[in-house]
Image (cartoon, rainbow, N blue to C red):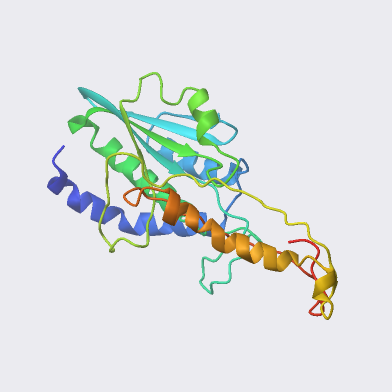
Amino acid sequence: MEVPALRPAVQALQPELVAWRRHLHKYPELGFQEKQTAAYISHRLRSWGIPHQTGIAHTGIVATIAGEEPGPVLALRADMDALPIHEANEVEYRSAIPNVMHACGHDGHTAIALGTAKLLQQQRQSLRGTVKVIFQPAEEGPGGAKPMVEAGVLKNPDVEAILGLHLWNNRPLGTIGVKSGPSMAFADRFQIEVIGRGGHAALPQQTVDAIVVGSHIVSALQTIVSRNVDPLQPAVVTVGRFRAGDTFNVIAPRA
């Protein structure tokens, strides 16, 4: 399939891509709850004559586009779920669901995957091989990839390579970033509870200030990367939340 020849067809998809993405943005759903999103995707795939399976790992979908010429099996993965965040943007397509928002770009991923599926279906006669388009639920936390793989989405036919789509604001507009090896690694998490001894702020000698202890821990955690990890290896340790104390004149017993 010659890429330059596809440019007009891709450009013609632009209005639809914007409309799909904005619809999905307006009606976000959390992980394993993407029923309306899945129905929206399935309706479009069906209208284009693309065979697909629904209800995989609760709400996942896999579409299969078989080219008319033999070739490898490639998969494209897009996630569908949103985050439990209230949207403050003042746009006409802002989230209509309180405290749920597509704040991580999964509406864009899904729209791009839909556009790719439609375009490939239109170009099946010149497609060498097969493309599976995987719409995955629950990327944000619950973990939808594992149950989808266990359900066999990479089998029949067996996938030889898979592209995990991800929007990235740090790349210039209109460019695509591809690299070999691991990328966009999943974050692990930790929780530390400091148990001190509370008391009046005017009598610190009678207390063990959990906030002071916790502050030292936060600073010391940064040495994990600076003094324990090879400088040529990517690593980040972030403390994203620190909770302690109830009032200004009482030394916190816990942090």
Q: In this view, does 255 lie to the left or right of 136?
A: right
Residue found 41% across the figure and 48% down from its top:
229
* Figure label count: 0
Q: Is residue 80 left or right of residue 129?
A: right
The picture places residue 110, in percent across and down from the top left corner, at 43, 47
Q: Nearer the viewer, residue 72 or 252?
A: 252
Q: Which of 130 and 238 is in front in this view?
A: 238
**Quadrant where the C terminus lies?**
bottom right
Residue 240, can we see it?
A: no
Residue found 46% across the figure and 39% down from its top:
135
Image vertical order of residue 137 relative to residue 226, above or below: above
Q: Which of 134 and 7 is in front in this view?
A: 134
Q: Is residue 119 left or right of residue 99?
A: left
Residue found 71% across the figure and 67% down from its top:
211
Residue 87, can we see it?
A: yes
**Location of residue 116 (image quadrant):** top left
The picture places residue 218, in percent across and down from the top left corner, at 59, 61
The picture places residue 216, in percent across and down from the top left corner, at 61, 64
* Furthest-top residue in this view: 156
The picture places residue 15, in percent across and down from the top left corner, at 34, 59
**Location of residue 101 (image quadrant):** bottom right
**Quadrant where the N terminus lies?**
top left
**Location of residue 89 (image quadrant):** bottom right
Q: Is residue 193 left or right of residue 56?
A: right
